[in-house]
Amino acid sequence: MSRWLAEALAVAAKDLRAEFRTRVALNSLALFALTTLAAVSYTIGPYRLATEDRPFLLSVLLWIVIFFAALAGLDRSFVKEEESHTAPLLRLAAAPTVVWAGKLLYNLVLIFVLMAMLAPLFCVLMGFEIAMPWRFAVVLAVGGYALAVITTIVAAIIAQALTRGALFSVLSLPLLLPLLIIVIEGTTAVATGDLASYTQSVRAIVAMAGAMTIVSAFLFPVVWRD
Amino acid sequence: MNRVGLALKWFLFVWMMVVIWAAFMWIPSAQGFKGESSRIVFFHVPTAWVATLAFLVSCIASALYLWRREPKYDFGAAVSNGLGLLYAVLATVTGAIFAKIMWGAYWNWDPRQTSITILLLIYAAYFALRSAVADPEKRATLSAVYSILAFVTVPFLMFIVPRIYFSLHPDVITNADPDNSLDPAHLKVLLASLAGFTGLSVWLYSVGTRIEEIRHRRRQEVL
Amino acid sequence: MSDLTGIMAVTMIIWIGLFAYVYRLDRKVSRLED
């Protein structure tokens, strides 16, 4: 295993270990997701929506929950470093790109754990019927990755600002909205079994994720350097 | 104010007066558009175009700042973003007026309207970020990074999102409305308006950056 | 027809006002620069 990858994994492992000890971010994510899901399920439930509207509206609800949960919990990766004053040490210990990759991995794990818990629950509680379940997993995976990439770089930016919490949402949301539009389209497609629309959506998500990955990797050292 | 600058500014004044006159008096009503609503296009399209141009300029200025670290690039980015925001608001408003006349509703979240709203949010977020960072160099760096990040989403906004949804927006890129885009008279006025708006933006940009330079100089003198 | 002329007049007035504002600003800035 290359040195760089090993270091990145070490950074991610350190964060994950700390996270599983205190479970702060996970709690924020889970609590937000579950409360919202309960509210949605209680008020709308499996029967209230007309059949032809279901694929689209349920996709919208699912992704809104995922996105807002992400906004509630994913800034921890960098904010925690600044608050506990371990950031300078991390700057000395690892190269910037290593830190970025490690933090990205950490956010990825959080998002995927959230999705693993939320998606099945959502489908069961809301009666969300998916025509192409494996492709649904693909949409979740690539959408989740794109979500993590964007929130990681924004978290790095706001960690150095004055009003972190609100600013994280304010900065992330405009960048995430195009992604939101496309993942909703992709999820609607897998629910209805529309292969053409699914392919087009996944291509767009991958393109966006790729572009953001490259740009983040280049810009992160600039943000991270003090 | 030097002579050439003065002459150019007055030339711009007359140019735009002629464009306005031409848009209302010289051009006949366009078919396919309800009432006289086609005339808004001469003002709506240039504002949307300049809004995008301003963002491009801002991204370039941001990249230059990150490369060279000269304050003037930060001023350029901030001023350009401000102009872009202003023009985006104008484009949204003129677009909404057009939508009201043509389709009866100011706002229906069609892809173009959605895209411009997201663009507005991005640039409002930019200024929220700037106001949250105290140190001038940090502020310049972080906002430059955000500017570039935001710009990466623009191609997706502009091209992918409208493709996915059915759009009410007259799509100038893929299916040119024959009565609008190909008519030579319409095209002439549209291009003239575009030139005028671009000229106005260049002027506004220069005034804005000069103000920032003065502010910066004053701050240095105090220190 | 007169409706159109009216809107044109308003647009022209807006343009004149905008131009005057930016022109004044430009002159003020020029003075400060010297």
Image (cartoon, rainbow, N blue to C red):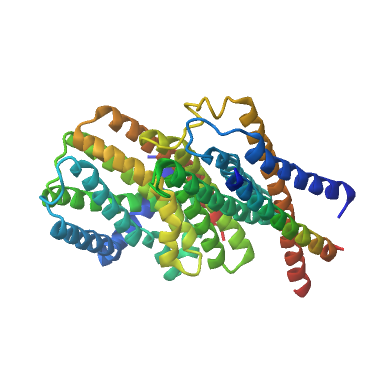
| Front residue of B215 and B21 | B21
User: Residue B78, position in %: x, y?
Assistant: 63, 56
Q: Is the N terminus of chain B in the top left, top right, bottom left or bottom right quadrant? A: bottom right
User: Residue A211, position in %: x, y?
Assistant: 46, 39
| Front residue of A178 and C29 | C29
User: Residue A199, position in %: x, y?
Assistant: 31, 30
Instruction: Please determine whether, in this image, residue B46 is positioned above or below residue A154.
Output: above
Taking the image as shown, residue A83 lies to the left or right of residue B197, namely: left
| Front residue of A116 and B97 | B97
User: Residue B15, position in %: x, y?
Assistant: 75, 42
Taking the image as shown, residue B1 lies to the left or right of residue C17, namely: right
Q: Is residue B87 visible?
A: yes
Which image quarter: residue B223? bottom right
Which residue occupies 42% across, 66% down? A166
Which residue occupies 59% across, 57% down? B141
Which residue occupies 59% across, 62% down? B138
Which residue occupies 46% across, 44% down? B101
| Front residue of A186 and B204 | B204
